[in-house]
Amino acid sequence: MRTLPDGFNGAVMAVESIDDAAVFMHGPGGCRVRHMVHSTSTFPRIAPGSPEDYYGIYYYGYPRVPASYLDEYDFINGAYYKLAEAMPIVGSKEPGLIVVINSPGAGLIGDNHERAIREAGLEGKAMFMDESLVSLPVSECYGHTLRAVMEHLSPERKNVRKGTVNLLGLSLFDKDWAEAKEELSGLLELMGLEVLSVPGAGASLDGLRASVEAEANVVVCPEMCAGLVDYYEALGIPTIRSPAGAPVGFDATKAWVKAVAEAMGKDPSPSLDVIRKAERKVYDKLTGMRYGALRLRGLTFSVAAAASVVRPLAEWLYSYLSMVPVAASVDPGSDPGETEALKRFLDEKDFPEAFGLEPVPCDVVLCEGITASVMQLAEECLIAIPIGHSCSGMDDMIPRPVYGVQGARYFLDELMHGVRGT
């Protein structure tokens, strides 16, 4: 049984990904704790003011994701009084935008968010998500919430800034997302492109407003920008997607660069040279290790994540390292085209039975950190590699993202360390 975030988690973390925005959670304190800790660990930033400013009600010493702390009385009699009291307090911290999000149970109460915002004088600086998102996939709600924020900001596309792009589909759920953002942005800049904004991964409100002037959007993981892509396309901003899926592994990263270069009329050579140089170093290392590297051949693996990540990763492990897929599962909300491409790959390589299977006992498990770690502790796998929903490895000092050159090295490091002494 896998442990995955849901749409409620996705909505909260989407807002928390905006550098100068703040979530106010209308719900019990228990719903707050996970989110305030997770958002701080994945996107640490200094809160304005002094620590003492957050000792009071609704914050209780912790600046991220303040909440109304609903109790049994509030569920029976309503909790508008808490909203009315909280809005001026949260507004006094001067975030650029406040987004009120109901916990799953609070949505049943029917408190008037709009009135609370209006009476606090925050009409231009606050919005609310008055819908139940808990049963929806995290990816669907991440992009949906970012789209709602963009619709609230409602920036006008007055100009098109040639040679500029937005990077879509990175999220706070991605392992070491900031390092992935830096590397992928750098590959685009080597081709002469300017990255205006990265919605969902540390963008500011000003950056989101400027994003509508981009010439195109470049997608990393299509699942995590579902809905947001449609918003930009309605404004006339085209979308660039790689035919190889997300840039996972050397091959898919090169394909991603080539797809962007072709669509934007740029020379991919400078970026490809960086990837090939890294690839050559890895090749030399593996060649020098000889029999140590040969231990990877024939290892069985299970992989589970978004389809746009699973497909290129499975293809790369099979073709580059001669590993054998025994289970390949896609997360709820996965891109249908990527899912079908994964199924087709497994069929063509004569592993049709692997499709749709959640991680099974095997040599290597690649999935969200909790499941991978539990399977390793239960001796159901030799090597456990966290690849999604940043639930482990948040104390790593050396970046280990999933995407790009750093991602390829991360996988190879974990694999080579895992087969030591076998």
Image: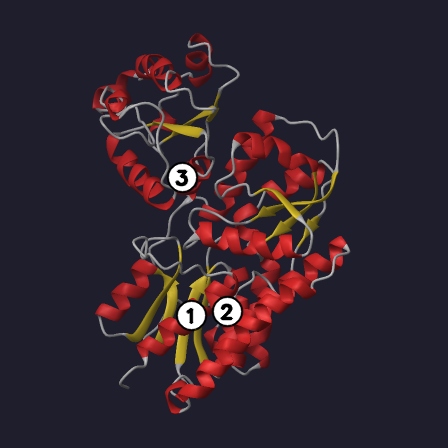
* Residue drawn at point x = 49 percent, y = 71 percent: 355
Residue holding disc 3: 8
Label 2 or label 1, whichever lies nearer to me, is: 1
Residue 110 in the image, given as x and y percentages of width and height:
39, 21
Residue 12 in the image, given as x and y percentages of width and height:
41, 36
For label 2, the crowd category at 10 Å Cα-Cα, with few meaning under 14, some 14 to 19 and many 20 or more, is: many
* Residue drawn at point x = 46 percent, y = 75 percent: 354
- Mark 2 or mark 1: whose residue is earlier in sequence: 2
Q: Is 1 located above or below residue 132 in the figure? A: below
Of residue 405 and residue 131, the one placed in the foreground of this image is: 405
Hey, what amino acid is under mark 3? Phe
Residue holding disc 1: 411
Q: Are marks 2 and 1 in contact (CB under 8 Å)?
A: yes
Label 3 or label 2, whichever lies nearer to me, is: 2
For marks 2 and 1, give the CA distance.
Answer: 10 Å
Hey, what amino acid is under mark 2? Leu
For marks 3 and 2, give the CA distance.
Answer: 28 Å
- Mark 3 or mark 2: whose residue is earlier in sequence: 3
Q: Are marks 1 and 3 in contact (CB under 8 Å)?
A: no
Hey, what amino acid is under mark 1? Phe
Secondary structure of residue under mark 3? helix
| 360 displayed left or right of 28 | right
Of residue 171 and residue 370, the one placed in the foreground of this image is: 171
Q: Quadrant of the N terminus?
A: bottom left
Q: Is 2 located above or below residue 63 in the figure? A: below
* Residue drawn at point x = 54 percent, y = 67 percent: 311
Residue holding disc 2: 313
Q: Which mark is residue 377?
A: none
Secondary structure of residue under mark 1? helix
For label 1, the crowd category at 10 Å Cα-Cα, with few meaning under 14, some 14 to 19 and many 20 or more, is: many
